[in-house]
Image (cartoon, rainbow, N blue to C red):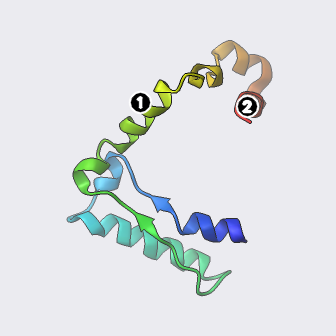
Amino acid sequence: RDQQAQLLGNVVLSGGGACLGPNDASFSDRLRDEVESIIHTHTPGWKVKVLSPDRRERSYCSWLGGSIMASIGMFNDFWITKKEYEEYGPSIINRKCP
């Protein structure tokens, strides 16, 4: 439960799809309201905190995060080839990315 509360307190919007709506806050407000309505059926009173950079930055956040990950020296150790996936199936993810 502590982890759930921590996760719900740190929802981050990024990418072009997060730019939908007539203004910067509309999508994040809607997401917060809908998630709270779902969790309040089981855990009344829990709050959802949605972090959202401005619309311009939000549109390229996903690319920026991907470029940072790709620049990490050992990132290529986490790559999964088609051959590995065909040999081990979805469980290869647990082997390569513990």
Q: CA distance from mark 2 to mark 1?
A: 25 Å
The amino acid on which the numbered mark 1 sits, given as a three-letter code, is Ser
Label drawn at residue 67: 1
Looking at the image, which residue is at 29% across and 69% down? 26
Classify mark 2: residues with Cα within 10 Å, few (<14), some (14-19) or many (20+).
few
The quadrant in which residue 81 appears is top right
Residue 6 at what x, y percent from top left?
61, 67
- Residue 32 vertical placement versus 69 (above, below): below
| Quadrant of the frame with the C terminus | top right
Q: Residue furthest bottom?
A: 45
* SS label for mark 1: helix
Label drawn at residue 92: none
The amino acid on which the numbered mark 2 sits, given as a three-letter code, is Pro
- Residue 22 vertical placement versus 70 (above, below): below
- Left or right: 15 in relation to 89: left
Looking at the image, which residue is at 51% across and 63% down? 10
Looking at the image, which residue is at 25% across and 55% down? 55
Residue that mark 2 sits on? 90
Q: Earlier in the sequence, mark 2 or mark 1?
A: 1
Residue 18 at what x, y percent from top left?
34, 54
- Left or right: 92 in relation to 81: right
Q: Nearer the viewer, mark 2 or mark 1?
A: 1
| Quadrant of the frame with the N terminus | bottom right
* SS label for mark 2: helix
- Left or right: 84 in relation to 49: right
Looking at the image, which residue is at 37% across and 66% down? 28
